[in-house]
Amino acid sequence: MSSIKLAYGKEILNFEVPSEVRIQQIEAKKSTPITNVEESLRHVLDHPLGTPPLKEVVNSGDKVVIVVSDITRLWIRIDILLPILLDVLNEAGIPDQDISIVTATGDHRLQTAEEHRAICGVQALARVPIYDHECHASDLVDLGLSSRGTPIKVNRRVWEADKVILTGGIAYHLLAGFGGGRKSIAPGVCGYEMIQKNHSLALTEPGPTGLHPNIMTGKMEGNPVSEDMLEIARKVGVNFILNVVVNEKKDFVFLAAGDLYEAHLAGCRVVEEIFGIEIEQKADLVFVSCGGYPKDIQLYQAIKALDNASYAVKEGGVIVLVSECSDGIGSQPFEEFFKHGNVEEMSSKLQQDFLMPGFVSLRTASICRKTPVILISSLPEVVVRRMKMLPASSLETAWQRAAELLGKQPKSVYVMPHGGNTFPILRE
């Protein structure tokens, strides 16, 4: 017999399947953590990709803005890197009083003082001031329209800086292909109208999923949302980026420094190398877990694992999503968007008023329409069905239900123990 083991909350679910069933694990490849962070950071700042060294990019007298991510991306651990980055700028003739930090909040709420300390660290904030971007601010600078008609209004402090340095983290992203890089500008420090228009590009030329065919995890070229973000970031002006790639233990494994496009692309390739897992063919059945507590405390956060799993399942196959959801759905707009009915109605509603939780709802509904999704969770069955999924109480009952839906015992099965991180790539 073969065994399936998946994290569920603080438990491990275990199920024995017939020995004739072929089971394959989809797990991240091993990566080597950076042991001497300061030495590595100074090296990449002196040997960046696509730009001169940072010390040559800035000039004495420059006013420098460093853009950092907000509290939702604490995994980037920029608090470790900021003091070193500030020291390098000081050595290049830029004193602390000529440097400020702006948080790339996009359309998120403002951060608290405690959150600022968590993001940047006490040491950095004792040296330089921090300002939250406000997407509804009255003093945003109007830069006109992008080639796709997106209104570009940007944070005044960022626009008026002599030099702009972006920091961030690179990971797979279901809307923009990859996070980091350009996203720190657009949507990070742009106006609300820019964010809405840019994100709504995901819905142009909708296919049967209600989405543009090039809107997918791991794809930037030809992705209208991602390409629009890059165009806007270039128009705003970025002089240097410092992005990180971390492993599942949040260790730094790669520091991407230099040009907005080239350095970010190099980081994306590292993400693909570690978390992009090649598969020879798609499977009848995919079991996917978020990785247990705290990653599976709400359904909204679990959709990333579901989305990744959808790339590993055959047409006509089945997905089993394992997520305890101890905190429930996790997003009221996400839950309420399912009231708009089918995929077409959801897409139409998003065209009128784009909301990221609504986009996640549409993506969820699109997957569930194409592939039955069985959910093992603590959610009431009526709620699970409202989310267009099928409830199950255990791996065994999920297996039985999957066999019924397939009309046969599954012959090929993938197991994704950390589905939010790993992305299946079909070998061509």
Image: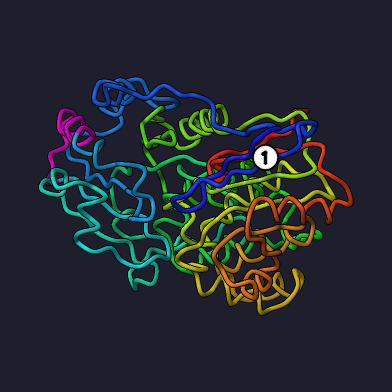
Which amino acid does the dot numbered 1 rest on? Answer: Glu
Residue 235 visible to the viewer: no
Residue visible at 63% across and 66% down in the picture: 361
Tell whether 87 sits left or right of 172.
Answer: left
Q: Is residue 268 visible?
A: yes
Quarter of the figure with residue 424: top right
x, y (%) of residue 208?
A: 81, 60
**Residue placed most toward the observer, 327 or 333:** 327
* In the displayed structure image, the side of residue 132 where residue 396 appears, left or right: right
Task: Say left or right for 175 vs 128.
Answer: right
Q: In the image, what residue occupies the spot 33% across and 44% down?
A: 164
Q: Position of residue 80 (x, y in %)?
A: 24, 37
* Side of 354 relative to 93 (left or right): right
Rendered view: 89 above or below 113: above
Q: Quadrant of residue 368?
A: bottom right
Q: Give the position of the C terminus as an image quadrant.
A: top right
What residue is shown with label 1? 16
Q: Is residue 376 magenta?
A: no
Region rendered in magenta: 84-97
